Amino acid sequence: MKKIIITTAALSLLLFTGCSQNAPDLDSKGSSSNISDASALTGDTVSINENAYGNESGGQNNSSADGFQSVYFDFGDYGIASDMENALSKNVNVASSAGGRRIKIEGNCDEFGTDEYNYALGLKRAKSVKDSMSSQGINTSNMVMVSFGESNPVCSSPTDSCYGKNRRVDLRLVK
Amino acid sequence: MRYLLLLLLSLNLFAVDATLRIEKDVEQRSRIALEDASPSVNEKFFKILLSDLKISGHFLADSRHNRGDLNSNFIAPALKSKEYVLRYALTQGSGTKLIIRLLKASDGTQVFKKSYSIPTTSKAPFLAHKAIYDINKVLKYPDISWINRYVVFSRYTTPRQSEIILADYTFNYKKVVIRGGLNLFPKWADANQKSFYYTSYAGVIPTLYKLNIYSGSKQRIISSEGMLVCSDVNKNGSKLLLTMAPQGQADIYEVSSSGGSKKRITSFNGIDVNGRYVDNESSIVFVSNRLGYANIFKKSINGSGVSQVVYHGRNNNAVDAHGSKIVYSSRESQNSFGKNTFNLYLTSSRGSGTRPLTTTGTNQFPRFSTDGSIIQYIKHRGSGSSIGYTNLTSQQSLLFPLGGRKIQSIDW
């Protein structure tokens, strides 16, 4: 029994101490170099101005145009509220008299989202408007949806009413 | 006697605790002091060197800005308690030159010497990173090549306008690569960081491009109605995980890097975004609102079942993965607007071993380093924003202040 106790105590001590890690050895060959090898840092990177490509997204297109009205949403929501039915009806009338021209539906969000999720939320809002117009008899085959996430705010003041203006869907004719 | 045996064995069961582990980590780190032998003192460069030493997790760096003589082997008595002294001289004119000497603090023996020169002054932070990378390598510590990498990020400038910027990890170096228009979601295309993918809004619908940052050549990959994001690139760069909506419904697709072949991975009448490869690229983790709020889920690339990974938080809307490790941001307060607490958590693709990485502020955009040892994130606290780094092994954290413009997306 005494032998067992001594063995157990020794094992316990070993386990308690844990496995030691070797301290790093010095590189004996590392003392000779006096070279310049920062070549990876010398490559010059480009700088591109995308405005030169005729950017469709440029300008202050942060509202509906061509007779359409913006549709607004509650925080984090993509269902159409009952007080937006009038705006939707007007948009149905404008769309039906558009003569088959392409209509762009742009989904937007407030700043309280991050990364990809906010862009998907903006798209769900655009799709809600498109589906609602489709259910009212509008041919949606000439409609195109794009989400702008939080990139296209109407205002930037930290108030509930401002945030509400940014949670919207804008509609316009494709130029 | 049995009780004595039981006591000894139970001591072992509870012996390995966090305190013991941290003490052992500290023992593994080298005590090092910096000595500035530059013709003129550059406080900013000294702080970058100091940050590099700290975030490596392999050094206990003395934060005093000492002066020294580059060519002397004399070690000041106050520094004899260190293991190493890093003596350096930075010279800047039309270009930048850096000479470093690593000396043993005990007797002044030279362990390593190297000189670096580049034809610009703006990239001086990269020289600091390269020097610490080399010293770390000479001392045979685990690789820290992530310290030399570019960070690429997009930030908003005005409504429907953004810019894409290259930076070093401390954000002391910054260069605009794409200005004008709305260009979002940059994502490195290859391990060598020669190209990145980004989404352009120059046309009627979003288009994914691949840009070579050295030649400026631009390759169109794919377009999609609704939204289009390159969320992840597989290890050899041949496959991409995209969030796109060809039928107006945001889902995750695996697409060849040429854009030629396309496979739909998720199919849900809600929001599925932010796909990241896990478990040797056999599965993905992603963000979905299939339970009514944003949360983290996992799905096999070829299977159909979806499993929930995270079981806490009110809004878990961003995730990154490395191997089987997962980091995500979780909203833990209930405010609809204004100040919310978002904390970062580390877990596994099976949802086990979850632990918090941050405890204060709004912490978002978590990204793993290429070796999975460091987490990069954006922290908003009070009126300011910072870019943060947490070393998962040494548990050390660093924050570097950011400018006022809002960051849209980031990759490292």
Image (cartoon, coloured by chain):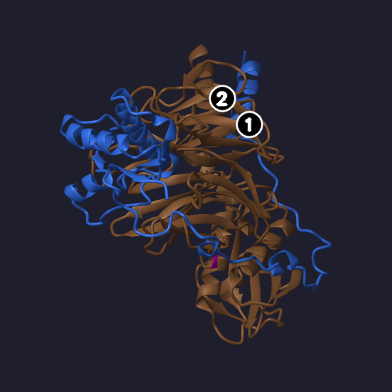
Chain colours: A blue, B brown
Q: Which mark is residue B348?
A: none
Q: Out of B412 and B194, give the one closest to the viewer.
A: B194
Q: What residue occupies the far left of the structure in this picture?
A: A83
The image shows residue B88 at horizontal and vertical percentages of: 65, 76
Which quarter of the rendering shows the N terminus of chain A? top right
* Callout 1 crowding tier (Cα within 10 Å): few <14, some 14–19, many ≥20: few
Q: Out of A85 and B163, give the one closest to the viewer.
A: A85
Q: Which residue is mark 1?
A: A14
Residue at x 61%, y 35% (from the top left corner): A18
Question: Which of the 4 quarters of the picture holds residue B93?
Answer: bottom right
Marks 2/1: CA distance?
50 Å
The image shows residue A24 at horizontal and vertical percentages of: 71, 52
Chain at tag 2: B
Q: Looking at numbered disc 1 in the image, what kind of residue is underneath it?
A: Leu
Tell me if I can see residue B61 in this picture.
no
Question: Which of the 4 quarters of the picture holds residue B24?
Answer: top right
Q: Which mark is residue B265?
A: 2
Residue at x 30%, y 48% (from the top left corner): A66
Residue B175 painted magenta? yes
Which contiguous range is marked in magenta?
Answer: B173-177
Of helix, strand and loop, which one carries label 1? helix
Residue at x 24%, y 43% (from the top left corner): A69
Chain at tag 1: A
